[in-house]
Image (cartoon, helix red, strand yellow):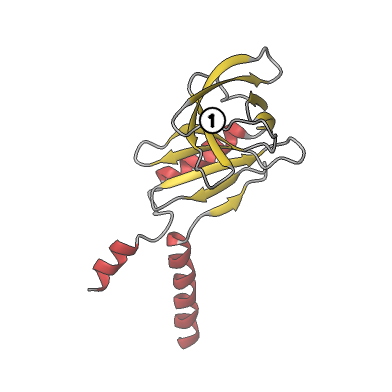
Amino acid sequence: MALKLSTLLLVYLVIAENLSASIDLITIDSFKITSMGAHSLLVSKKSDTSDSNAVFLFIMERPFCLCKKVSFVQHTPDFEDFVRPEEDTFINGTMRVDFKKAQQVEFEVFIARPNKTTNIIEPQNFPSIRDAKIVEIQTVYGKERFILEGFKDVMRQATEMCKSYIPYVEDKAESKDMKT
């Protein structure tokens, strides 16, 4: 009886810890799903362009569980005459989906901190990427290619995780209130 009770307690502790644990996983299509708090997920994929640290990403938040805020992380090039766009400004570029004709796209420079070389840009008017296999962007930061095979699957997986209503990470304030 004591063995069954201790086994049951161990299983409970493992399950309880996993329910409130942070999410940090990589899908079989090489998308990374990471928790950004108790109710937000960040889904990302690295660029296919060689020697690049660029990243494609989107956010999914509760309560609506919609894929939103498509963004690209790009690094400031080391060109001597490069003028880095400032945060909260807009730049023009192109976006090409599945080898179709490139479309002009306006990107908002969402983050460009002076002491960092990382920039986050968000397309404002862009072609649908829901069924995309390959997305290419060209901006002042350079040209990047993202292989998005499995994109619809990762959107579905993130939506299912979102709708589960299990907190992605333990809410410290809530657990403090429960202990007092």
Q: Is residue 61 left or right of residue 146?
A: left
Q: Quadrant of the N terminus?
A: bottom left
Left or right position of 60 against 80? left
How many marks the image carries: the answer is 1
Instruction: Identify the image quadrant of the C terminus.
Output: bottom left
- The residue at the point 51 percent across, 43 percent down is 114
Vertical side of 89 occupied by 154: above or below:
below
View extreme (front): residue: 81
Q: Residue at x 47, y 61 (%)?
A: 21
Q: Is residue 140 above or below residue 162?
A: above
Q: What x and y, as percent, mark residue 118? A: 58, 42
Q: Nearer the viewer, residue 144 or 168?
A: 144
- Seen at 67% across and 12% down, the residue is 101
- Residue 117, picture quadrant: top right
x and y, in percent, of residue 106 in the image: 52, 20
Residue tagged 1: 85
Give the quadrant of residue 99. top right
Q: Nearer the viewer, residue 11 or 20?
A: 20
Q: Position of residue 115 (x, y in %)?
A: 53, 47
In the foreground, 86 or 93: 86
The residue located at (31%, 66%) in the rendering is: 175
